[in-house]
Amino acid sequence: MGSRKNYNVKNDFAMKFKTPASRRKLCKDYIKHIESGLSDECFPECDPQTLKKYVELYPKDFDTDLMIKSRRMRRLFWEEMGLRGSNGKIKGFNAKSWEFNMKNRFKEWRDKHEIEHSGEMTFKTLPQLIKEMNEEDKKKKKE
């Protein structure tokens, strides 16, 4: 039996896309998938976290500018569908269903926007607020 000294040094057994050519094909397939209006989550080749990992590990094999553009094209796909549908160019177009899809797909379309807050939040009772306001009024009168 030969030496195991150089045996799979990179430990890439689990790597599905081992060659630059296979990674470039992955990128091309991803772009085509996204531009057709589909989500990252239903990309059949790999999940979004795996794709992100490959992009980080092999940046030369992924045209990130085209990947970003494909996400804009996905948005364009859905917005153009809405325009065509609302102009009567899509038979049986359901505007309510399309709107529901847009609200779930794009955060800017949502009725309710989540706001993150970092730091401290202090809540005061009405009597505390009145007391503070009275104290501020007293300070102003002294000045």
Image (spheres, helix red, strand yellow):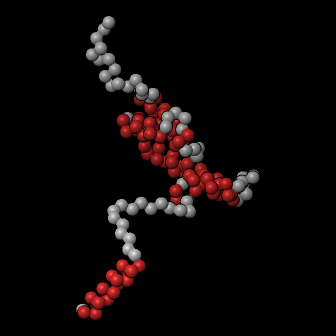
Q: How many marks?
A: 0
For the C terminus, the image quarter is bottom left
| Position in image of residue 59 (x %, y %) | 37, 38
Say whether residue 2 is left or right of residue 62. Answer: left
User: Which residue is most to the front?
Assistant: 127
> Horizontal and vertical percent for residue 67?
47, 44
In the picture, measured across the screen, residue 76 lies left or right of residue 23, that is right
Residue 88: image quadrant is bottom right
Query: What residue is shown at x 56% (from left), y 62% (from top)?
Result: 111
Q: Is residue 30 left or right of residue 7?
A: right
Above or below residue 61? Residue 69 is below
Q: Nearer the viewer, residue 67 or 94?
A: 94
Q: Quadrant of residue 61?
A: top left
Q: Position of residue 80 (x, y in %)?
A: 62, 54
Please report the residue visible at 49 percent of the width from the left and 32 percent of the height from the top: 25
Q: Tell me which residue sits at (48%, 60%) in the image.
A: 114
